[in-house]
Image (tube, helix red, strand yellow):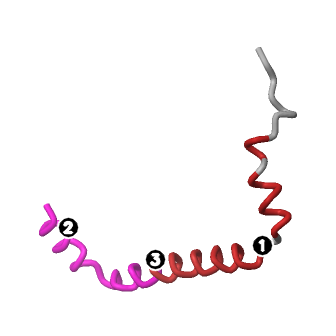
Amino acid sequence: MLKFVKNHMESITGIEIYPMISLLIFFTFFVMLFWWVITAKKEYIKSVSNIPLDNQNDTTL
């Protein structure tokens, strides 16, 4: 099965750019996510982390 896919992919011209593009998108996303985590305000992180514990919006059936 893998040989069939490999041979089929080798026949497509210009396909070698797609792995590089996907790596660039992956790397950029995680760098931006890391930057957001480092620069996030502690008050915002604390308020977001308490959302699951907030009982004001619970409705009992």
What residue does disc 2 label?
A: 5
In space, the residues marked 2 and 3 are separated at their CA atoms by 19 Å
Determine crowd level at label 3: few under 14, some 14-19, many 20+ residues with C-alpha closer than 10 A: few
Q: Is residue 58 above or below residue 3?
A: above
| Sequence-first tag of 2 and 3 | 2
For the residues carrying marks 1 and 3, which lies nearer the camera in this image? 1
Q: Is residue 39 above or below residue 56?
A: below
Q: Is residue 5 above or below residue 46?
A: below
Looking at the rendered structure, the secondary structure element under dot 1 is loop
The amino acid sitting under disc 2 is Val
For the residues carrying marks 2 and 3, which lies nearer the camera in this image? 3
Where residue 11 sits, quadrant-wise, is bottom left
The amino acid sitting under disc 1 is Ala
Looking at the rendered structure, the secondary structure element under dot 2 is helix
Q: Main secondary structure of the magenta part?
A: helix
User: Where residue 1 appears, x then y in whole percent?
Assistant: 13, 61
Please report the bounds of the magenta region as a residue range: 1-22
Determine crowd level at label 1: few under 14, some 14-19, many 20+ residues with C-alpha closer than 10 A: few
Which of these two is toward me, 59 or 31?
A: 59
54 is within the stretch colored magenta: no
